[in-house]
Image (cartoon, rainbow, N blue to C red):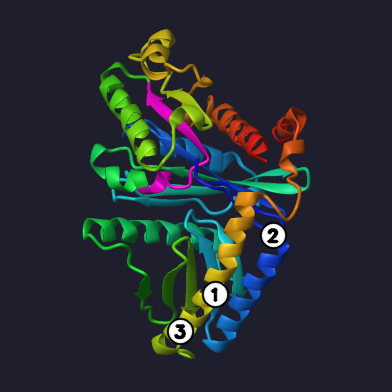
Amino acid sequence: MSFINYSSREINCKIVYYGPGLCGKTTNLQYIYNKTNPEAKGKMISLATETERTLFFDFLPLSLGEIRGFKTRFHLYTVPGQVFYDASRKLILKGVDGVVYVGDSQMERMEANIESLENLGSNLQEQGYDLAKLPYVVQYNKRDLPNAIPLPELEEALNPTKVPSFEAVAPKGVGVFDTLKAVAKLVLTELRKGG
Amino acid sequence: MIQQLVMYEEELQQINAVCEILHRDSNARAVLLIDKNGQAMAQAGDTHELDVTSLSSLTAGNVAATGGIASLLAEKEFAGQFLEGEKTSYHVSIVGQRVILVVLFDERSSLGLVRLRVRKAANELTHVLDVMVKKSASGSGQPSVFSEITDDDIDNLFND
């Protein structure tokens, strides 16, 4: 649910990075944080365990510039990936405007990928959303690992609706901004339709 | 799809006025109004040293988690929360089931006074929010600028 403030001329949107544990959601946000000008970003918050696993969420506020005199502000969130944090994941999806699903390219994580994707669909449904109608992109992370599954196989398993998808190596930044730009564009396009 | 919230000048002025009065009458350090998704809507008082964006996001997360606990306990919601600090205390209440009113206060005020003033402010805010929700739904007030956004406008955001 984007929040439009005509008074301060701001559009605020919420984008959620979803995916299985250790797929690189937080790494995506960290890369964006490190590569963004200080004036365009706020503080990045990570509510993590002592071993740096996301406990509740990571949060990064980002300004993308102006569109027709309105400042566009994106709030990026990640969810905790581990299966048992499902209650927290549901909470973070509330009010979402766009979703990035981050899949792990490694063969041994395929089951976790599929489980997380199904979990995304059902949690969105519980909040009254339909993934098919939401601005949504897919990122295949860890493309540099030797056990990475070929792209067509990933596409078939994780992207049946053929939404925009991107190959990524998040620690090096490969594909990170492409993914963000794609989802941000879809969110703004959706806003235009709604307007 | 869940309804979009739109804030127009008139409602913002009314909300700001309520927050200012609450800030003054409760002797608070600062007052924040936050939507349940974590977006700051209005603020009053000594906020220049606060990271309002982060506070808003964490408060919304906190309220969402508390709401999750409430539903597990078969409660509709916990309408308020109070965190007592050594110097600053933090009082949270949910207004009209959709926004969060935060009052930060120190030794110049007290929990009793804050609670009393929040109750009055919450009633007034509920009324303004009802109007805001109706306006957002009908799209009245001002013509939408977003229907005029072109693909080029969107692309230009990313030309860095």
Using the image, tell me which numbered label, if any, was put on residue B114: 3
Which quadrant of the figure has residue B72?
bottom left
Q: Residue at x 32, y 48 (%)?
A: A88
Determine which residue is flagged by label 1.
B31
**Of callouts 2 and 3, the N-terminal one:** 2
Q: Nearer the viewer, mark 1 or mark 2?
A: 2
The one of A36 and B28 positioned closer to us in this rendering:
B28
Whole-percent x and y of residue A59? Answer: 47, 49
Dividing the picture into quadrants, the one containing residue B16 is bottom right
Mark 1 belongs to chain: B
CA gap, disc 1 to disc 3?
11 Å
Residue A102 highlighted magenta (yes or no): yes
Amino acid type of the residue tagged 3 in the rendering: Val
Placement of B69 over or under A183, stated as above or below: below
* Label 2 with label 3: CB-CB less than 8 Å: no
Asked if residue A11 is among those painted magenta in the image, a careful observer would answer no
Tell me how far mark 1 sits from mark 2, CA to CA.
20 Å
Q: Same subunit under labels 2 and 3?
A: yes
